[in-house]
Image: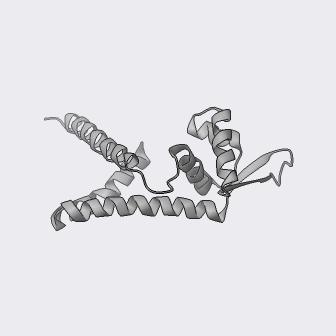
Amino acid sequence: MSEELDARETAAALLASVGALLRRVRQVRVEGELAMPERAALSHLDRIGPTTSAELARREQITAQAMGATLGGLQARGLVERGADPRDGRRVLLALTDAGRQALADKRSARTEQVAQALADGFTPQELEQLAVAAPLLDRLAQRI
């Protein structure tokens, strides 16, 4: 087999298995969980800091109206706040509140706990070690795409 064939086979296997893992994790509901668009908006605000609704919509590749509805719900729950742009008072910036940061952390913790339980219940110590070694490689792969 050529190296390219191995890379393609590996890519296909990774996409299938990581995709299945993500779908399954998303299917299992956690009490009080954020909806996918809400989590995405909060995650972006956490990573990039205060920004406009239009910029969030562009990053998520959804309409401004859809993002506005998502942000309205998040604001009503106290997870995001609106404020004037200090450089251009005509623009409104959205920022994550402390409650928004906590909701995002809680979601991440719940998902981590969900996966940790599955690992503890069905994997040998050697398999856990293999997965631990693979995690940084998957992160590096994600950074290269």
Q: Residue at x 35, y 59 (%)?
A: 114
Residue 78: where, in percent of width, then height? Answer: 68, 58
* Mark count: 0
Q: Is residue 59 left or right of residue 53?
A: left
Q: Nearer the viewer, residue 133 or 101?
A: 101
Residue reaching furthest right? 89
Q: Determine the residue positioned at 19% across, 60% down.
A: 122
Q: From the viewer's perspective, is 52 left or right of 120?
A: right
* Residue 47 image position (x, y, % from top left): 58, 55
Vertically, is 142 above or below 134? above
The residue that appears at 30% across and 42% down in the rendered structure is: 20
Q: Residue at x 24, y 65 (%)?
A: 120
Q: Is residue 78 left or right of residue 46?
A: right
Q: Quadrant of the N terminus?
A: top left
> How far across and down, in percent of the image, does residue 5 sit?
20, 34
Q: Residue furthest left?
A: 1
Residue 9 picture location, percent across and down: 22, 36
Q: Considering depth in this image, is 7 or 62 the residue closer to the camera?
A: 62
Q: Quadrant of the C terminus?
A: top left
Determine if residue 133 is in view: no
Residue 11 appears in the picture as rendered: yes
**Colour scheme of this structure image?**
one colour
| Residue 4: quarter of image | top left
For this orientation, the residue located farthest to the bottom is 125
